Image: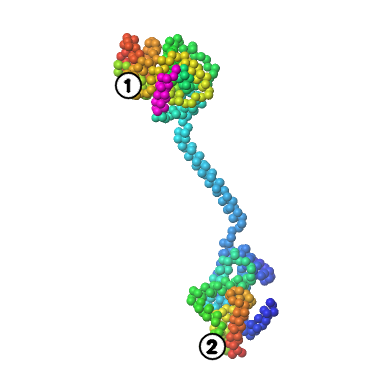
Amino acid sequence: MPAPAIVAETRDEDLMLAYAAGDAAAFDVLYARHKGSLYRYVLRQCAHAGVAEELFQDVWMNVLRARASYVPSARFATWLYRIAHNRLIDHWRATGQVELVSAGADDDTDPLDAIAAAREVEPDAQASARERSTRLYSACAALPAMQREAFLLHQEGGLELAEIAELTGAGVETVKSRVRYAVAKLRLELEDLE
Amino acid sequence: MTTPKNDDKSTLVDPRIAAAWRAASNDEPPASVDAAILAAARREVAAGPEPIDTREARANRRRWWPVAAAATIAAVVVGVLQLTPTGKLGAPETDTAVTSDVPHAVERRAPEDTSSSALSAKVEQHARGRDAAVRTEPASKEAQRTPASSVTLPAAQYPVAPAPSAQRPSAPAAPSAASPASTLAAPAEPKQQRVAAPAPASSPDPFPGTQKPAADAADAAAAASGQIASSPPSPPPPARSEAAANVARERDSLARADAPPATLAAPAQSRTAERVSAAPAPQSAPLAKLAAGSSADGGADEARAKTRTPLPVPEWIALIRRLRAEGKEAEAAKEIAAFRAAHADHEKLLPPDLRDWRPPEK
């Protein structure tokens, strides 16, 4: 197992190459770096934790199987979240939620109504941070799918707008608009708590 | 690019939203999922691509597969060829080498002896051709065209052969013995000529001992063919059986004569030609007819029997007795029949023991 100091300085791409060459410890480091953010990215896109765990595991299995063909042409995070994005799309198609994805592209729909409805469902959430988190997640879940995905990729995955645009196949300006809409709606949701 | 990115971050990321999100984002995958994924990762590494040296070793082994397959096929082919009978591979000289006293190099030129049917056809054809040639050509030319028989070839192989004149007695019947037919029939009746030595021209072999096996084989063949015809040696002369024996002898000798003449046999051939040319021509015609086959009628058989080379009476009787003593009953019966055919007063000439002797029927 590589030394911790070296591991901390090693890039994700080098760790993945090391794992592809047979270094299992490199994958441990890589997994530790990205498991939380990826899990939350998948979890916020799904309504059920069990499904999220399954999808999360599938994403990492795909990473393992694709290690031999991995080429560090982009950041490892971009490659990892592309795999997760494709897996989510497959899941949505399998569960008949593809229309939700396309409907989410409609930025004209006002998500504030849904957030207000969610707030009405839980009127006591303002009392604690837990309730705030719940409202935040509820507000995130109420976002259109494209805005939510762009926001999660930007917030959880740390991807740049260009990377999100490349990953989702949309333009950079489109991605920027989606993120702006998402942040604005979440800010509106959190105003009541402050 | 960095400036807009910073602008994007400043405009897109609200510090309050980011802090609230970080505070709320404490979800982690279950430990079981972590363990499953890490275990799968280690399994993938353990079952990963094999080392290069292993692959090269396998490739080296596979490189020998075609060679090994070819060697196996070759071994199987050699084994099959070893098990295949040699007669089927077109090597008939082994058959002739057993029954002939002719040197091996000469026998290789006459592989046709093995096929009896082809032999019969050749004998017929040869006899017909010879018969026609005898009628139209002088005897000397016919003798020159006579191919070197297997009997004369050994003499050619031993150029320092001493003349066997000492073994030849007076040879009163030289004209008939010197005839080509007698030369051709020499393998069939060598014992008569060795004992009585009436045909020096037909047995120029300087090593008579070497000819004996072939003579025995010819006698056996003649006996085999003659026994069937002469098994009931009735008192009247069995000219038919004698004719059958002669035909057998003729077939044997003609089959040998059909072989292409050897270059080594040239001196013997020339000597034979000289002898034949010295022989009286009328002798060759009935003998050529004798070789015409077994389809002739009884009168022709009697004629053939009469043309058989007669021996002196005492020698002939001695020969018959010797054959009886050796247990060659069929040969003895044939000789008695020939004797009776050759001598009209055979009842007086034959001693009582031979006069009343009958070969035992088998």
Q: Position of residue B11 (x, y in %)?
A: 65, 83
- In the image, what residue occupies the spot 59% across and 74% down? A167
The amino acid on which the numbered mark 2 sits, given as a three-letter code, is Asp
Q: Is residue A101 above or below residue B331?
A: below
Q: Position of residue B94 (x, y in %)?
A: 47, 29
Q: Quadrant of residue B283?
A: top left
**Circle 1: residue type:** Asp
Q: Indicate the quadrant containing the N terminus of chain B: top left, top right, bottom left or bottom right.
A: bottom right
The chain that hosts pointer 1 is B
> Is the residue marked by circle 1 packed among few (<14), some (14-19), or many (20+) residues within 10 Å?
few
Please state which of residues B252 and A80 is positioned toward the viewer in this rendering. B252
Local SS, label 2: helix
Residue numbers of the magenta segment: B120-139
Numbered mark located on residue A142 in the image = none
The label on residue B297 is 1
Question: What's the CA distance linking mark 2 and mark 1?
Answer: 136 Å
